[in-house]
Image: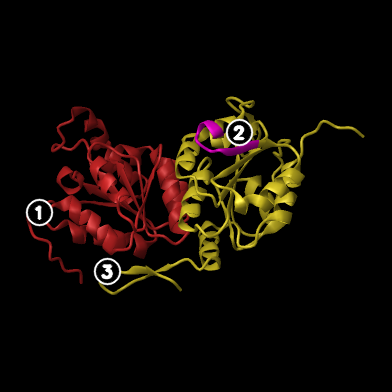
Chain colours: A yellow, B red
Amino acid sequence: MVTNARPTRADHYRALAGSLPSRALVVTSLGNASYLWASLHHAPENFYFEDAMGLTLPLALGLAIAQPDRPVVAVEGDGALLMHMGALVTIGAMNPSNLTILLIQNGVHAASGGQALTNATLDLAQLARASGIKHAENLNAPSALATRIAAAEKRDGVGVMVLATEPDVEVVRPPVPFDPVATKHRFMAAIEAPRYVPTLFGGGMLERP
Amino acid sequence: MTTSTEAPEAHRPSVVLDTLKRLGFGTVVSVPDSWLGEILIRIDQEPGMTLVRATHEEEALAIACGSRLGGVRTALLVQNAGVLSMGAGMVSLAQRYQFPLLMLVSYRGTPDDPVFYHVPKGRATEPVFRGIGLAHACTDRYRPIGPQIEHAATYAEEASCPFALLMGREDIQW
């Protein structure tokens, strides 16, 4: 049967899971962006957003700068991107090569029930390029995503892939608790992040565990 | 106990920068104002520090959270108006996930600030901070600034939350 339907988020996620480099850190936006990823590929190196719509990309930027030797993949939706489009400019200015951004363009605010976007047809790849991100492209086939993810290590600068998908407004039941503090501690333990070592009267420092 | 060898006549912004370096702050995220402009240039020139110039304070807050998540001690340098505009991210990201962040905030709109249009923001600042549960303190201009920075940074780590230190012009404007 011939169909013009766009791939689903799950199609792209399966391609991502199959091509994700070892040691990759994955930051996913709220709602199904996190719930579905946890269902398909739960790992301590995942940082799930519970809320804070629009802040996935800037958080991923800070993480990529702090962990320059590890690939960081961020998944954000088109609606959330519109809430903080300035983040693209900051990401373009800092341009860390270890950061790969997947923009799910489904044309709606899926995480809040499918409300219409202010503009659902923007060329987000062009927007990223205008923000200083050289490697930005629209992709349709999940197989193309897998190829790009596998080759991301050789890329010079941030990569942005815009993935046109069908909206997925039916909420996926997450397979693990999404307690925010547990998510943070699990993640930081997995990457062996320096932890704060207090002293009795102040002046503690961050030290490697 | 923290002791200070800071001379009373010390250039306070220099002491702020030296204290950040001594405490191991590796990243500073900022949206500038006229008081913060010069110290940011100095931070940008520090070989051991990364300065991220964000486009919006809520975005800056999220960058700082990501940096701290990655294990780097991180400070935010913003104007008080910027903290007013980062409220949602403050409660639903920084506080909800308990990120320890030092926030050095230029306190505009006080009687010491000659720029009249900052007054409405100054008047709203501390009530809003209390309203969103943001731990904070004002600097004491008669005490050395270095220990005040260190205590604020320690509070953020010990309490696992952002801590905002509201700073006067003499503290932060180079």
Instruction: Give a yes or no on whether discs 3 and 2 share a subunit.
Output: yes
Q: Which residue is mark 2?
A: A125
Left or right: B154, with A153 as reference point? left
Name the residue that disc number 1 marks: B142
Residue lying at 13% horizontally and 38% vertically, measured from the top left: B112
Mark whose residue sits in front, 1 or 2: 2
Q: Quadrant of the N terminus of chain A?
A: top right
Q: Secondary structure at mark 2?
A: helix
Expressed as whole percent of the image width and height from the top left, the position of residue B2 reads 20, 69
**Residue A134 at what x, y percent from top left?**
55, 38
Label 3 or label 2, whichever comes before in sequence order: 2
Q: Quadrant of residue A141?
A: top right
Instruction: Tell which subunit mark 3 falls on.
Output: A
Name the residue type under label 2.
Ala
Q: Please, what secondary structure does the residue beneath circle 1 have?
A: loop
In the rendered image, the vertical position of residue A9 relative to residue A188, given as above or below: above
Q: Are marks 1 and 2 on the same chain?
A: no
Distance between mark 1 and mark 2 Cα atoms? 53 Å
Q: Decide: marks 1, 2 in contact (CB < 8 A)?
A: no
Work out whether B115 lies above or below B26.
Answer: above
The answer to whether residue B38 is visible is yes
Q: CA distance from mark 3 to mark 2?
A: 48 Å
Segment colored magenta: A129-137
- Residue A99 in picture, x, y percent from top left: 55, 49
Q: Provide the residue designation for mark 3.
A: A202
Judging depth in this view, the residue of B88 and A167 nearest the camera is: A167
